[in-house]
Amino acid sequence: MKKWYNEEYEFTVKVLGFLRGNKTERYCRNGEEPGDTYTCTYGCPVNKDGQGICSKTMMMLYPLMEAVRSGGDLENLGGDSKYTKTVVCPDGCVMFRLTAKPLGNPNFHKGKFWDYPDETEEQK
């Protein structure tokens, strides 16, 4: 991997708790526990041990992350503030809080970081 673009936002996803029960065993397939924290910029969120967040939950988080990246306000989507929103996993088991932190870097598209590579002789 060769990360070359400094992203605009850093995202933190914290496990707040369970909707029912008080333990992860036989409840949350990914083993999420209250207090677990995941971070990312553009890639998928991982915890301090390099373990990834639940893939079903990521399907819910990605559109919210894209909304923030495109200048949106999470309050318009039921968030607690412009940069925070509580979500429940698709299985209805675990509650998460998504928090975005602006890093002050230029937007990927407006900053014209996106471009098609020049054709090489091999591609012609």
Image: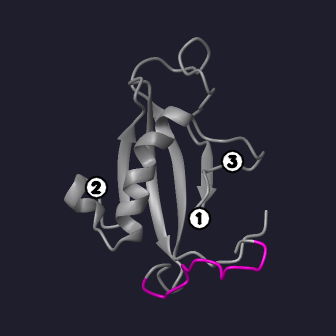
Q: Residues within 10 Å of mark 3 (few under 14, many from 20)?
A: some
Cα separation, mark 2 vs mark 1, equals 19 Å
Range of magenta residues: 110-122
Q: Residues within 10 Å of mark 1 (few under 14, many from 20)?
A: some
Residue 16 lies in magenta, yes or no?
no
Between 56 and 28, the residue placed more toward the observer is 56
Give the residue at mark 1. Answer: 41
Cα separation, mark 2 vs mark 3, equals 23 Å
Q: Earlier in the sequence, mark 2 or mark 3?
A: 3
Give the residue at mark 3. Answer: 47
Q: Earlier in the sequence, mark 2 or mark 1?
A: 1
Give the residue at mark 2. Answer: 79
- Residue occupying the point 63% across, 79% down: 6
User: Three-letter amino acid code at disc 1?
Assistant: Thr
- Residue occupying the point 44% across, 48% down: 61
40 is higher (above) or lower (below) than 110 = above
Residue at the front extreme, as displayed: 124
Q: Earlier in the sequence, mark 1 or mark 3?
A: 1
Between 29 and 5, the residue placed more toward the observer is 5
User: Three-letter amino acid code at disc 3?
Assistant: Asn
Secondary structure at numbered mark 2:
loop
